[in-house]
Amino acid sequence: MRFLGSTPKEMIGIYQHLLKVHGTDSPRALGWGSPLMHNAHHHALTNRIKPGYSVIDFGCGLGDLHRYLQKTGLAVHYEGFDQVPELVTAASKKNPGGHFSVRNSLEGLGAHSRDYVVACGVFTYRLVGHEIFLKKNLADFALVAKRGFALDLLALETRSQLAEDYYAIDRDNLEQMLKSLGFKFEITTSSLLKHHFVYVKFA
C-alpha cells in the first residue's frame, strides 16, 4: 500500500483498509510493527505528564495510550481524538472508561484549555504538503496546551535507508523548525527506536 502523496482525506481510507485487514487487536492496524515498540513510544512521550493533568491523545487510534496510562497508574483526564470514525468506535469499545471523539484538528477547543497534548506516530506517513501540515498542527497544539506537548518524528540520521512514503527529519532541521515557531523545547533522539522525541514546554 502506498502512502506517498496522500491527502489527509485519503489517509482515512488507508487506515480504514488497515483496520479491516488486521483487526482491532493488532498494532499493524495503525502501522506499528509490534506492541513493544508502541509501548516504548508511549513511555517516552508521557514522562513529562503529571497526575491530574488533562491530556489530549491526538491521533488516538485504538486507544492504546489510554490503556498504557491505566496500566502505569498515571491518573489523568484523558481525551482521545482521531479522524478515522472506525478507529474511534473501536477505541470506545476497547476502553469503556475513555472519552473518544472524531476530530482531525484541535481547532475550536479554546486557548490553554487542556494541560498537555500527545501525538504518537501521527506524522510518520508523508502527506501532500507534509511540513505545512506538521507546522499547522504544532501551532494548534501550542494554542490548546497549557503546560506543553510531546510528539515523535522519524530521525533521518538513524536510518541508512528510508522508503519515500515516510517523513523523517534530521535533528538540525527539526531544531530550526521548532525555533521558527518560537517554542522552548527539548529533543531526545533514540538510535534504538530511530525517532526524535520532542517535548515543548510552556509551564
Image: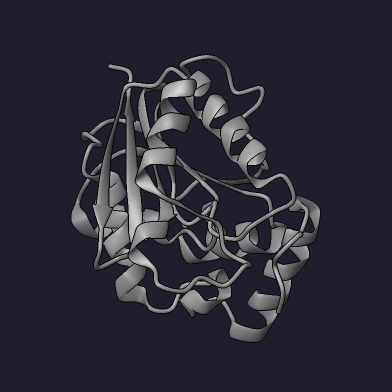
Q: What is the number of callouts on the image?
A: 0
**Does residue 114 show up?**
no
- In the image, taking residue 35 as reference, residue 128 lies left or right, namely right
> Which residue appears at 58% of the width and 40% of the height?
134
Q: Which of 126 and 202 is in front in this view?
A: 126
> Which residue appears at 30% of the width and 30% of the height?
53
**Does residue 131 show up?**
yes
Residue 8, placed above or below residue 35 = above
- In the image, taking residue 99 as reference, residue 35 lies left or right, namely left
Q: Where is residue 28 in the image (x, y as percent from the top left)?
A: 52, 78
- In the image, taking residue 99 as reference, residue 132 lies left or right, namely right
Q: Which of 133 and 177 is in front in this view?
A: 177
Q: Which quadrant would residue 101 be assigned to in this image?
A: top right
Q: Position of residue 21 (x, y in %)?
A: 66, 85
Quadrant of the frame with the N terminus: bottom right
Q: Which of 26 and 127 is in front in this view?
A: 127
> Which residue appears at 27% of the width and 63% of the height?
40
Residue 11, placed above or below residue 46 = below
